[in-house]
Every structure is written in C-alpha cells, then in structure tokens.
C-alpha cells in the first residue's frame, strides 16, 4: 500500500467519502504532500479551512487511512499560505473569485436541458426551470427546486445558467453552492476590505443560481447576508433559482423571513424517477460514455434493481461495465444479477407511517441486545459498529432525515460517517444473507 502516492491515497479517500464530500469547498482546497506508515500530510491555504476539515472529516479520513495504509496512520493538516499578494486572511480561492466576470460562472457545459431526461417525476421542475431560463426575472422568480440526493436538481440549475448564457449573453450569470457563499462571506469578514467586493459580486448578478440552500440552516450571519442579497436581486427583477433537499417550510433554523421569500415564487419538487425514466436515463448514459452492445434487457434489469436516484443508476452501470471488462465476461442479465444481487434485495423500502430515529435506535438496540447509548458511542469494536451502521442505513431508508441530522442523532459531528455506513451496508446486502435477514426483521419490527 505504501507504494501508492499521496495523491492516489487522497483520491481513494475522496471516492469513499462520496459525492457530497467530493464537492466540498474546503476539501477542494486540500493538497496531498507526504505519506508515511504513521502520517498522511496535506496542506490547506487557511486556518479556517484546516478547522473545517478537522471538525467535519477527520474521523472518517482517519478510518480510511487505517484501511488503505495501515493501523495507526493519521491525518496531519498543515496550513501553507499561498504564494501571492492577496490580502492577509483572505484565502487564495476567494481572492481568485472575489469579482467574477460574467462568463466565469462555474457552470458545467454538459448539463443542458437537451441532456435532461424528462419523466413524470420531474416534469414540473423541468418546465419551471425552462420557463425562467427563457424569461429570466419574469417567470417563476424565485424558483425553488427540492428533492432527494442525485435526482437532477443540480443538473437543472446548470441547465438554466447554460441556456441563459446561450440566449441572453448580456446577462451576468452566477452559480454557487451555499457553502461557497458562506465561505466567501466569512473571508470577506476576516479581510474586512473585501466586504464591498463580495456584495458587488452577488448583488450585481442578473441570475443567481444557488445550490443546496439547506446548508444555510443555523448560520445566522450568512442568512442575514443572503437575506439582503435576495432582496436586492428580487427588487430589481433579477432571477434567483435555488435547490434544496427539502421544501422551504421544512428548513428548520432558517429564519421565517427567508423561507417565506423562498416560497413566494414557484416551488417545484423532484421525485425518484419511474421505471421508464430510469431506463431512458441509462440509455442516455450508454450513449454519453460510448458503451456499446449493452442490451435493453440488461438496462431494464438495472432500472428494476436501482429505484433510488440517477447517481446510483450511473454508478451501477459503470460498475457492471468495469466488472465485465476485468472478468472478461459478457455483460448479460445473469452477470448483472451476480454483481448487483437479485431484485428482491434491491427494491426500495416501503413504509406506511412516520418512522423516527428513536423507533430505529430502540429496535436495533433491542435486536442486538445493546443499549441505545452503545449505538451513539464512539467505540469501534464490531459489537457496536455493525448495529450502528445498520441503524444509520435504516434512518437513511426509512426517514426523511438529512445526513447531518442522522449524524447528530448518533453524536457524530461528521455526516460523512453516515455516508460511509450506508455505503458499506448497501454494498454488503447482496452478498451477506445474515445482514439481509437482519435488515428485513428489523424493518418488520419497526413498521
């Protein structure tokens, strides 16, 4: 394992942490430096970035280092000031983007309306997004799109921006995540002299596209700044489009004056895609990646197995293609069933009443003859880790809780611990009959 470079190890860790972590603004500022048996050193450009990574990701990263490098290997985060003339306290990332020209919008050119597969589950959101793209500031302003992870919210956000750039090139389009907004706001406070640049950047945009607005929850100062930014843009008929994992009314610890404004325009939801839409998405992915000779029967099988979201569909398709290539076997339905598991173990959980985290923790604790405090502890022995991971997985499947809320329910500061637990359980279900039986019995008990 030590033959691998620090960059190789870092890429493996980011892959394990999942989509949310890979897009994290702080992790993106991290640079791998050295790797030994006992220490993996990375550099960051600012103390605040160091603190954020330490508080939110340290536990999970150390767990992966033990897995990839060896027992006892720990993360060391060192602050290396950028070699430039930026204002002290103002990070290089923020300095590079303090005032963005209209064309530097962080938009993904591949995310267009033409490449968005429309079905019954997303038709309303697609129509609303296209409407405000054609008539920015006049139709559906603000537009608030909400839905679960991996259902296409971010794709629509980028599609709005790309359409406006193509058809209304004189307008200034700005895409950011709420974490980027918060980070740049904090930088503007610490640098003091950049506060006006920050406000000019956001309040002069003709189109503001902001992703994952739910991460403003509990951040009073950032909410205050966004409130004034929102008012300034809306007063001048500038288009605002936001995405979230929940509707405005469910954004706890977000000020009511903000949530009322979020809902004053158009609120549209995206649900998990139906079978026909999933199949159409898979066909498009095959075309995008140049996957030839994959039969419709195989794609139909994947569409039946994966009933969650688009990212899972894409991930399972890529896995099958890679496994087929590595094993030098034909990609058939039988091969897919061996790799992905039978349909019966992959169908989404159906429940008929509101299930709480307390219900799940009590059921799991009783099933494994533990105390609930054991599930919430930080002990790493298998007697606790296995039930704890199952509990987190069931919370993700049976409730509408966010990753952060699940982490808090188990006394974890880092939501990537929940991602890791859910991924581990999901991967093992098709190959572990005891785990599958445990989960089925627990679900029956909880429901």
Image: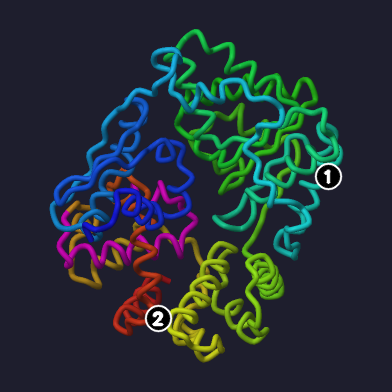
Task: Using the image, tell me which numbered label, if any, was put on residue 233.
Answer: none
Determine which quarter of the picture holds residue 292.
bottom right
Q: Position of residue 303 (x, y in %)?
A: 61, 76
Q: CA distance from mark 1 to mark 2?
A: 43 Å
Q: Position of residue 331 (x, y in %)?
A: 55, 85
The one nearer the camera, 10 or 126, is: 10
The one nearer the camera, 385 or 333, is: 333
- At a point 33% along the width and 84% down the height, the residue shown is 433
Q: Position of residue 444 (x, y in %)?
A: 40, 77
SS at mark 2 in the image: helix
Q: How is the image coloured?
A: rainbow
* Disc 2 target residue: 430
- Is 225 placed above or below 330 here? above
Determine which quarter of the picture holds residue 296.
bottom right
For the C terminus, the quadrant is bottom left
The one nearer the camera, 438 or 86, is: 86
- Bounds of the magenta span? 379-408
Q: Residues within 10 Å of mark 2 (few under 14, many from 20)?
A: many
Outermost residue on the bottom side: it is: 334
- At a point 33% along the width and 38% down the height, the residue shown is 53
Q: Position of residue 21 (x, y in %)?
A: 43, 47
Tags 1 and 2 touching, CB below 8 Å: no
- At a point 28% along the width and 57% down the height, the residue shown is 4
* Disc 1 target residue: 131
Q: Residues within 10 Å of mark 1 (few under 14, many from 20)?
A: some
């Amino acid at each position: 394992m030590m033959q691998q470079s620090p960059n190789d190890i870092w890429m493996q860790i980011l892959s394990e942490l999942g989509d949310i972590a890979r897009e994290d603004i702080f992790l993106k500022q991290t640079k791998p430096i050295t790797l030994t048996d006992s220490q993996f050193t990375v550099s960051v450009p600012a103390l605040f970035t160091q603190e954020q990574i330490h508080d939110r990701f340290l536990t999970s990263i150390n767990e992966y280092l033990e897995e990839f490098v060896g027992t006892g290997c720990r993360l060391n985060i060192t602050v290396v000031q950028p070699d430039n003339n930026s204002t002290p306290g103002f990070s290089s990332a923020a300095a590079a983007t303090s005032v963005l020209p209209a064309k530097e919008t962080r938009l993904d050119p591949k995310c267009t309306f033409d490449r968005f597969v429309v079905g019954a589950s997303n038709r309303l959101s697609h129509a609303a997004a296209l409407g405000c793209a054609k008539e920015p500031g006049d139709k559906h302003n603000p537009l608030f799109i909400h839905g679960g992870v991996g259902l296409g919210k971010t794709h629509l956000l980028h599609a709005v921006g790309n359409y406006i750039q193509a058809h209304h090139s004189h307008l200034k389009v700005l895409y950011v995540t709420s974490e980027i907004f918060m980070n740049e706001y904090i930088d503007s406070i610490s640098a003091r002299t950049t506060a006006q640049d920050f406000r000019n950047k956001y309040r002069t945009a003709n189109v503001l596209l902001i992703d994952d607005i739910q991460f403003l929850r509990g951040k009073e100062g950032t909410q205050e700044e966004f409130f004034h930014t929102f008012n300034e843009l809306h007063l001048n008929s500038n288009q605002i489009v936001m995405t979230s994992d929940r509707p405005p009314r469910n954004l706890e610890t977000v000020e009511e004056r903000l949530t009322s404004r979020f809902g004053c325009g158009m609120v549209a939801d995206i649900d998990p895609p139906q079978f026909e839409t999933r199949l159409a998405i898979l066909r498009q992915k095959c075309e995008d990646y140049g996957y030839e000779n994959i039969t419709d029967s195989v794609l139909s099988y994947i569409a039946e197995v994966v009933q969650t979201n688009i990212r899972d569909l894409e991930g399972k398709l890529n896995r099958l293609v890679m496994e087929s290539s590595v094993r030098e076997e034909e990609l058939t339905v039988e091969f897919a069933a061996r790799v992905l598991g039978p349909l019966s173990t992959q169908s989404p959980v159906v429940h008929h009443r509101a299930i709480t985290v307390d219900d799940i923790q009590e059921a799991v604790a009783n099933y494994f003859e533990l105390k609930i405090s054991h599930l919430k502890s930080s002990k790493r022995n298998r007697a606790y880790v296995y039930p704890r991971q199952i509990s987190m997985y069931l919370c993700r499947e049976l409730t509408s809780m966010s990753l952060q809320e699940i982490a808090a329910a188990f006394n974890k500061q880092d939501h990537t611990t929940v991602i890791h637990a859910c991924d581990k359980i999901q991967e093992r279900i098709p190959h572990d009959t005891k785990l599958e039986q445990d989960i089925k019995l627990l679900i029956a008990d909880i429901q």
